[in-house]
């Protein structure tokens, strides 16, 4: 039996960091806006006739073997830790070869590890006979990944990976709810340039420092989170109205606030890329994920995407990513 699962990564447009429990509970109306892109995570499982279990990551050029009888020990395994812990969670009773692969660069800030978790959960759950309903996938992914990164995990990445499309994610005391957004994929694709800085992001470090400061009751940080919430609301309205001038304004206003939230959200290299893109016709910039490296999304003037891409491609260490809007989320195929 061969099982193949894919899940897209995402670009967050507004409302980042407020998706971490329990921070969103202190800001009624908290939402996050993101959309899925085609730089997907993939998980392929092929069953075996023996009891060998082979776990392999093509991104990291790393693999190791164990056996069905030793799966319980994977809870302590540090090699391919996320995959190992997921296999431990599902405890398959047959031998298999699992191959994981992500199309997004390492540390891109596009939710690659969360997308990989969703893809692996989809494949492993099929391997064990669809033991869990799909509505459990996001909570399983968040809980297991938290034990890997060892700091509180945000939830928005899992929703982009699971559902695909454009998403407004609501956070509150009643739980988390996803609302699909009606956006024109062609508009997003023609106006947004995504560049990888060549520097892995500092997701765990940035988010943990922000988390601690917020829980300690810092009033300045609390006010910044109120602004994050309000920016996401405005972004949703701008996208609903197909008002790209307003989208740019929301992004421009949020950029310095994000830097106040975590001063190391940008590096000198990232600042140079923002200046370069602005000269080429970019209207606004959004650091993807927690920042400190990773990717930057640039909103361009109508018709300026190619000039922005050319300007950024000339910068040392920058990689302009090729992507498309991903309408579909998690997909699982079996043969």
Image (cartoon, grey):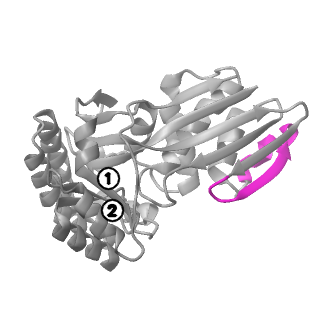
Q: Quadrant of residue 186?
A: top left
Q: Pointer 2: residues within 10 angstroms few (<14), some, or many (20+)?
A: some
Residue at the spot x=53%, y=56% of the render? Answer: 149
Left or right: 307 as drawn, with respect to 159: left
Which quadrant does the N terminus fall into?
A: top right
Q: Which residue is mark 1?
A: 17
The picture places residue 131, in percent across and down from the top left corner, at 65, 21
Mark 2 in CB contact with mark 1 (< 8 angstroms): yes
Q: Which residues are magenta?
A: 58-76
Secondary structure state at the residue bearing disc 1:
loop
Q: Is residue 140 left or right of residue 180?
A: right
Residue 210's disc is 2
Q: Does the rendering let one see residue 37?
A: yes
Q: Residue at x 70, y 22 (%)?
A: 335
Q: Nearer the viewer, residue 307 or 71?
A: 307
Q: Is residue 22 above or below residue 254?
A: above
Which residue appears farthest toward the right when viewing the image? 50
Q: Name the front one of labels 2 and 1.
A: 1
């Amino acid at each position: 039996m061969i099982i193949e699962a894919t899940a897209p990564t995402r670009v967050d447009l507004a409302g980042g960091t407020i998706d971490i429990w329990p921070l969103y509970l202190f800001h009624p109306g908290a939402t996050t806006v993101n959309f899925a892109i085609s730089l997907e995570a993939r998980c392929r499982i092929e069953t075996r006739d023996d009891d060998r279990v082979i776990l392999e990551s093509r991104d990291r050029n790393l693999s190791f073997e164990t056996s069905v009888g030793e799966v319980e020990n994977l809870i302590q395994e540090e090699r391919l830790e996320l995959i190992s812990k997921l296999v431990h969670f599902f405890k398959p009773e047959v031998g298999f070869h699992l191959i994981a692969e992500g199309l997004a660069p390492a540390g891109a800030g596009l939710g690659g590890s969360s997308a990989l978790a969703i893809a692996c959960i989809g494949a492993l759950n099929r391997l064990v006979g669809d033991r869990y309903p799909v509505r459990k996938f996001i909570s399983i992914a968040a809980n297991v990944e938290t034990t890997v990164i060892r700091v509180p995990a945000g939830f928005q990445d899992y929703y982009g990976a699971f559902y695909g499309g454009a998403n407004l994610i609501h956070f509150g005391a009643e739980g988390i709810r996803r609302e699909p957004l009606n956006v024109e994929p062609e508009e997003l694709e023609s106006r947004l340039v995504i560049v990888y800085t060549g520097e892995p992001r500092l997701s765990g470090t940035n988010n943990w420092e922000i988390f601690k400061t917020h829980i300690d009751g810092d009033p300045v940080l609390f006010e910044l989170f109120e602004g994050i919430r309000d920016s996401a609301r405005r972004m949703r309205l701008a996208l609903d109205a197909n008002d790209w001038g307003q989208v740019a304004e929301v992004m421009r206003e949020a950029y310095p606030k994000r830097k106040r939230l975590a001063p190391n959200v940008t590096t000198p290299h990232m600042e140079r890329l923002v200046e370069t893109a602005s000269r080429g016709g970019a209207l606004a910039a959004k650091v993807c994920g927690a920042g400190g490296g990773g990717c930057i999304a640039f909103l361009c003037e109508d018709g300026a995407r190619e000039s922005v891409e050319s300007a950024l491609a000339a910068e040392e260490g920058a990689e302009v990513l090729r992507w498309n809007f991903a309408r579909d989320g998690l997909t699982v195929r079996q043969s």
